Image: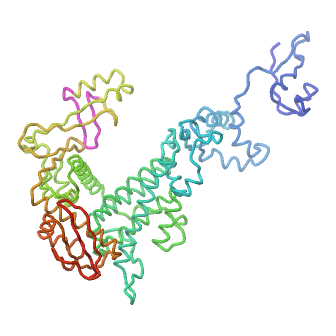
Amino acid sequence: HPRIDVYGSLAEIEEAFGTLPRDEHDEVNLHRPYIDELTRPNPDDPTGQSTMRRVEEIFDVWFDSGSMPFAQMHYPFENAEQFESHNPADFIVEYIGQTRGWFYVMHVLSTALFDRPAFTSVICHGIVLGEDGQKMSKSLGNYPDVREMFDKYGADAMRWFLMSSPILRGGNLVVDEPKIRDATRQMVLPLWNVWYFLGLYANAAGEKDAGGKPTGYRGRSRYESTDVMDQYLLARTGDLVRDVKESMTGLAIADAAELIQDYLDMLTNWYVRRSRDRFWEGDEQAIDVLSTCLETLCQVVAPLLPMVAEEIWKQLTGGRSVHLTDWPDADLFPRDEALVARMDAVRQVASVGNSLRKKEQLRARLPLAELTVVHHDPSALEAFSAIIADELNVKAVRLLDVASEEAQGMGVEQRLSVNARAAGPRLGKQVQTVIKGSKSGDWSADENGVVTSGGIELAEGEFSLDLVAGESSAMEGRSVGVLRGGDFIALDTRVSPELEAEGTARDVVRAIQSARREAGFEVSDRIRLTVDGDEQVVAAVTAHRELVAGEVLAVDVEVPAAPAAGAHEASEKVSGGTVTVSVVKA
């Protein structure tokens, strides 16, 4: 006589059993073992011999959490209209274990009861681990003190560390102080330094009062420019606004942080560094464009660096709060995908070229004779030859088509090496096909860096591309670096006495700039300069007197000479010996 009864209230239980389950304190308790004590004869058994008992199975404890969307509103007994208008939920967030807990049970119940999902969007984060690699725990105390981190690095650094981490992609996160410090070094300080740089040069170029002091920043909104570096920055800023909005809308917070980090790296290590001379000269276009893009960057980064963005934005604009502004309009910025692609290619050439300099231990201020760029589309880089030459401090840039006879005669061959240990777990037996393709030449690398071997696409970390220079005399004294898609560069590393002398003069320029700062001069102050030192240093400065004067705003350069009265004097070692410089306002 099978029978199952389901009770919906305490009253029904008491009616059926004549009592309620009570614990040792005589309080009603529906949990085990007290609920197990309730039994009753089976009403469907005429013999009265069978007994009804609680089923042994226990409902998943997450059932309660799955009921949360309607239970919190006491639906359906009340708040029916509010529940129907707010369900499914727009967004929920919990850690990855809830894929089989809360997330799952909510969907099960919502589907069973309402024939719809419980929520439309979700962020599923990983597990937060302590410094010892174990799950972070108050009882273990295996994490740095939060308030101490706030005091040391600021709350924004902690926020950026979390928002940009793998934990928002479902990975685990080890919370330790060095990583929080890195957030300050890689994001907070560079952003602040851009604002400091802009304010410094904008004020120097701005209107002056009767006493000659700057009256403040005079930048205006500007979305177009005749300068190619400005055009690139404006186009990249429009892309940033669009791409970050797309990532944020898709709840890909870590992706948005990565986009912002890449943009800030471009802004500080490319645009600002490449445009210093223009700011030094008070170029209005440069000041206005950087102001416009920095204001936009503050609005974009405000959700992730709320306090730093607020402080910079208020000082920059004089407005009330960046958090009260609308999201920037990307359509105000020019969209130039071709320019962005070409400039990014130039940046790659510069990056690889600087890596070759470090490899060959050739300091950045030492000029070199020539850089050869072998590229699949050399015409795309032609307009930027001067930028490449200046960035890598070379006298000449040669552009060759990778298919040209001269390029082929350089005897440079690109080879693919497969990391079987890294590729094996993903590819299984196919890894042998990949290895065979790398050795037989059955592989390719496109301009985006995607590598295919034996018809199988390889992932990052599963391979390396190396350039091997042959015995060609054209490669004598050159160092080779690989670009994407089979392109490469060859840097002439031979240093003549003339190049060495110019390098020494540029080292002296750095020493003079340091002396200017020590003396407390403004960036626009003109100076009188005397230089003395070892014979090789004096000869180098004499040969490049105009270069030195132009770089340090010197109205005259005396070499060698006694320092002027009241001049600030400094000595230091440079290539070629020791130099002593003295500076005084002109």
Q: Is residue 454 magenta?
A: yes
Q: Compared to 209, does 465 lie above or below?
A: above
Q: Reply above or below: 402 against 45.
A: below
Q: Position of residue 292 (x, y in %)?
A: 39, 68
Please tell me which residue is depicted at 35% across the width and 77% down the height of the picture. Answer: 204
Q: Quadrant location of residue 46?
A: top right
Residue span colored magenta: 439-455
Tell me, yes or no, if residue 253 can be seen here: no
On the picture, is 531 further left or further right than 335?
left
Name the side, left or right, on which 509 lies relative to 327.
Answer: left
- Among all residues in the image, which is located at the extreme bottom? 210
- Judge by depth and name the residue closer to the eye, 557 or 347: 557
Residue 244: x and y in percent read: 44, 53
Q: Residue at x 11, y 37 (%)?
A: 470
Q: Measuring 66% from the left and 40% from the top, which residue is drawn there?
A: 139
Give the total of numbered labels: 0
Establish if 236 lies above or below 295: above
* Horizontal and vertical percent position of residue 426: 38, 27
The answer to which quarter of the image holds residue 235 is bottom left
Drawn side of residue 260 relative to residue 51, left or right: left
Q: Position of residue 135 (x, y in %)?
A: 58, 37
Q: Residue furthest right?
A: 18
How was the colour assigned to the protein in this rendering? Answer: rainbow
Q: Classify the position of the C terminus by image quarter.
A: bottom left
Residue 40 vs residue 169, the one in the foreground: 169
Q: Looking at the rendering, which quadrant does residue 532 occupy?
A: bottom left
As for residue 569 lying within the magenta part, the answer is no
The N terminus - image quarter: top right
